[in-house]
């Protein structure tokens, strides 16, 4: 669970504020409820042994019993998991499709956010793809209105696909990204718009050079987060 942070915080969902550096330390949610560990919080939120690193001994007496199968298979788990996601989506459905909206009222950090992202990506692109010019493709996860793609990803990638479950955000992204952008002799464009939540999305194998997730991963339960990373890292090798 990510420590409480804008704009990942959901008005209706719990956030677990863990002490820095310790994944399973005490914490509290946005309503002030205290938990002795992230495992305990997830047990109450989705009734699951959702934390992949959780062991039975970490679940205190009184918390929902851990399952002996896959996370999410426990009694009531799927209903509570659905509730977790529907509360999250309901929150974003009520948010204006604007920079201010997707940044939780902190639109003023947009420029610094974009600069920081570029500083992070530039050396990685140089290291991974070097100076050799090639067609690069990125996936923008939880893209919202396309803020990250428009201000940043599209400058570095020939194609960017967007995945976002909230329809009015994705429609705004389509409008914001309707024109192609010329970078040197190259054309850069937003290619595909997928209206689907990340926990249900599997990136097409071999398509993406970079999968970018910004201000969004805290929407997922820990086990869905890990599962998405496992699906995202599958690479198709062509001989
Ligand atoms: N990444 C964008 C938007 C951040 S706001 C930006 O930085 O501008 C968080 C976004 O996550 C919202 O667009 C919200 O609709 C989206 N989101 C919420 N639940 C999600 C889920 N389960 N899967 C993918 N995205 C989700």
Image (cartoon, rainbow, N blue to C red):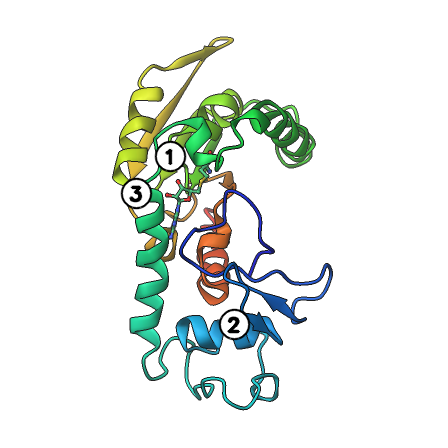
Find residue 123 and report its image quarter. Answer: top right
Q: Is residue 24 above or below residue 213?
A: below
Judge by depth and name the residue closer to the eye, 212 or 210.
Answer: 212
| Mark 3 surroundings: few (<14), some (14-19) or many (≥20) residues within 10 A | some
Q: Which residue is mark 3?
A: 93
Regarding mark 3 in the picture, which secondary structure is present there?
helix
Q: Residue furthest right?
A: 21
Judge by depth and name the residue closer to the eye, 97 or 21.
Answer: 97
Q: Residue at x 38, y 57 (%)?
A: 199
Give the quarter the ligand 1 occupies.
Answer: top left
Specify which label sits upstream in the sequence, 2 or 1: 2
Task: State the CA–CA distance, disc 3 to disc 1.
Answer: 21 Å
Q: Which residue is mark 2?
A: 41
- Measured as percent of width and height from the top left, residue 27 is found at 62, 67
Cβ–Cβ under 8 Å for marks 2 and 1: no
Task: State the CA–CA distance, disc 2 to disc 1.
Answer: 34 Å
Q: Is residue 218 visible?
A: yes
Q: Which residue is mark 1?
A: 161
Disc number lying in front (3 or 1): 3
Regarding mark 2 in the picture, which secondary structure is present there?
helix
Judge by depth and name the residue closer to the eye, 90 or 69.
Answer: 90
């Amino acid at each position: 669970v990510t420590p409480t942070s804008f704009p990942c915080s959901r008005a209706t969902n719990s956030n677990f504020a863990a002490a820095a550096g310790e994944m399973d330390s005490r914490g509290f949610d946005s309503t002030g409820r205290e938990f002795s560990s992230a495992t305990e919080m997830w047990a109450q939120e989705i009734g699951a042994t959702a934390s992949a690193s959780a062991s039975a001994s970490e679940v205190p007496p009184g918390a929902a019993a851990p399952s002996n199968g896959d996370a999410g298979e426990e009694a009531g788990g799927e209903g509570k998991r659905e509730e977790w996601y529907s509360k999250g989506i309901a929150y974003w459905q009520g948010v204006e499709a604007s920079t201010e909206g997707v940044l939780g009222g902190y639109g003023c950090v947009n420029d610094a956010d974009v600069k920081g992202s570029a500083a992070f990506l530039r050396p990685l692109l140089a290291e991974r793809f070097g100076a050799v010019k090639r067609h690069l493709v990125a996936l923008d996860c939880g893209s919202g209105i396309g803020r990250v793609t428009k201000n940043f990803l599209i400058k570095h990638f020939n194609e960017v696909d967007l995945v976002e479950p909230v329809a009015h955000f994705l429609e705004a992204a389509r409008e914001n990204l309707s024109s192609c952008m010329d970078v040197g002799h190259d054309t850069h464009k937003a290619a595909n718009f997928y209206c689907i939540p990340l926990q249900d999305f599997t990136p097409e194998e071999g398509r993406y050079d970079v999968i970018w997730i910004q201000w969004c991963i805290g929407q997922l339960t820990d086990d869905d987060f890990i599962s998405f990373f496992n699906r995202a890292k599958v690479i198709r090798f062509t001989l």
